[in-house]
Amino acid sequence: MKNSKLSNWPNYADTLGADFFPYVESIASDIIIPGLDFYLHDGVRGAAALTMPSLLSCTIAGTGANDSFKVQALWKGMCDKLIHQLGNDPVPELLVAYYTAFSQCIELIGPNALTDEQIASIGSSIDRNLKETYERIIERESGDDEYTEENEEDDEEYTDEELLDEISKGINVVFKNTKLRFLPAFQKLVPTIAAFINDENSSLKLLALCSISDLIEFTGAESYNLKDLFMQPVGESLTSPSSMIRQAAAYCVGVAAQFGGPNYKEFCFATLPSLLQMVSVPDARANDNINATENIIAAIAKICHTYNNEIPDFQNLAERWLKLLPVLNDEEAAPYAYSFLAELIDMGFPPVSQNIPKIVDDVVQALLYHSLGGKSAERVVQSVKQLLGTIPQDEAMGILNGYSAEAQQEISKWFS
């Protein structure tokens, strides 16, 4: 693909933007879309697919709207062709390119980028691609495959992992774009997702866990109808030896608390012992484990925020949770954790007022590491200012002045 002349075209389109728009229609209809049928050279098909988001972006810039007639007409031709290729092209490396292009284009188009027919078709293509990838992985792991070259096996394994990652992104972007409209197509994926989530291969299990998170986030309470697919495997995955699996499972629990509704209450409560167990192990903050740990901290915060005093011994849980801060590495997890911290401050939770220096330091460290920013930071800092206002001014200033000169610049920015 790198040697194809087509691979330079996105650069021209990206650079020229709206100025490239007059050339888009002819290039797309005469070269790019037909290029996906060029089976004499894999690189041409891949480069043609990867050019599509750039051409679509130019058209949006040239027409001034992502829902203009020209944009929709161009997208329909691209989308139908990409979905066809996903269901028919046998080359895994090219499927990676197709999914990449597909996801990027949907993000550009925005809500309702797909018709019901296209949703059904992409669901069928995803299912086929997942089944074929699963067969390749199982065949390799069985040791009975036909491969004789170790490098070929390594390349195949890497390609399948990359493909699974792009399919996962594709599932996410379709759910995000179409929400409940994707649910009937996803239900047809259930047997495949069930095989993945119960497999010991981490790449397969990871895709399934991420897909379940998308299911819950974008279909809400409706996802509970599929609970038998995932509740037990998600709970078991919280204590997996793999930090990536623990992270994905913890995120899934947090999403259930955040978007799943009342039906998920008992499930979330049942996960708390495992969450607390894994976040408290001696190496929980080691480099390999820190992202999983911080996702667990965020998941507990979401459970506490949603169910609050319905949680058995909520006061004790919240006090234990305070000791787990700070969250410094995960910019997605941090806002949820610190939002709950602000809630505890605002409600006058006694353990907060008893540990003001630690609470302030937890927030300051997040600001210094930039895991917390924007409106989330403003909200938390405002609560911390009120907390500092409950103690003598010289004591409050002593806490804030106890940091390095470099740190003082950031502290001044937020607390002045």
Image (cartoon, rainbow, N blue to C red):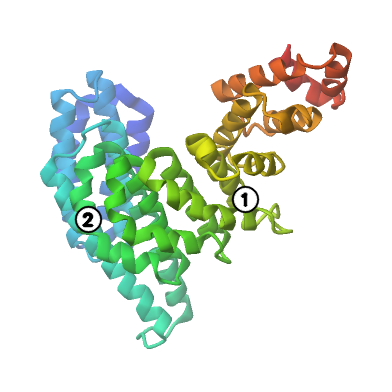
- In the rendered view, would you say 257 is above or below 344? below
**As rendered, which of 89 and 302 lies closer to the eye?**
302
**As rendered, which of 189 and 336 lies closer to the eye?**
336
Query: What numbered label is drawn on residue 293?
Result: 1
Can residue 27 be seen from the camera position used here? Answer: yes
Q: CA distance from mark 2 to mark 1?
A: 31 Å
Sequence order check, earlier mark of 2 and 1: 2
**As rendered, which of 269 and 333 lies closer to the eye?**
269
If the image is split into quadrants, where does the N terminus sit? bottom left
Q: Position of residue 214 (x, y in %)?
A: 36, 46
Q: Position of residue 388 (x, y in %)?
A: 76, 18
Using a 10 Å C-alpha cutoff, classify the residue at mark 2 as few (fewer than 14 neighbours), some (14 to 19) or many (20 or more): few
Q: Taking 410 as reference, is 111 left or right? A: left
Kindly identify the residue that appears in the image at 56 percent across and 63 percent down: 239
> Considering the numbered disc 1 on the image, is that residue within a helix, a strand or a loop?
helix
- In the rendered view, would you say 63 is above or below 246? above
Using a 10 Å C-alpha cutoff, classify the residue at mark 1 as few (fewer than 14 neighbours), some (14 to 19) or many (20 or more): many
Q: Position of residue 40 (x, y in %)?
A: 20, 63
Q: Taking 185 as reference, is 245 left or right? A: right
- In the picture as drawn, the residue positioned furthest to the bottom comes out as 144
- In the rendered view, would you say 381 is above or below 225? above
Q: Amino acid at mark 1?
A: Thr
Kindly identify the residue that appears in the image at 38 percent across and 83 percent down: 147
Displayed quadrant of residue 195: bottom left
Q: Which residue is mark 2?
A: 187
Q: Amino acid at mark 2?
A: Gln
Kindly identify the residue that appears in the image at 50 percent across and 39 percent down: 310
Number of residue marks: 2
> Considering the numbered disc 2 on the image, is that residue within a helix, a strand or a loop?
helix
Kindly identify the residue that appears in the image at 32 percent across and 65 percent down: 194
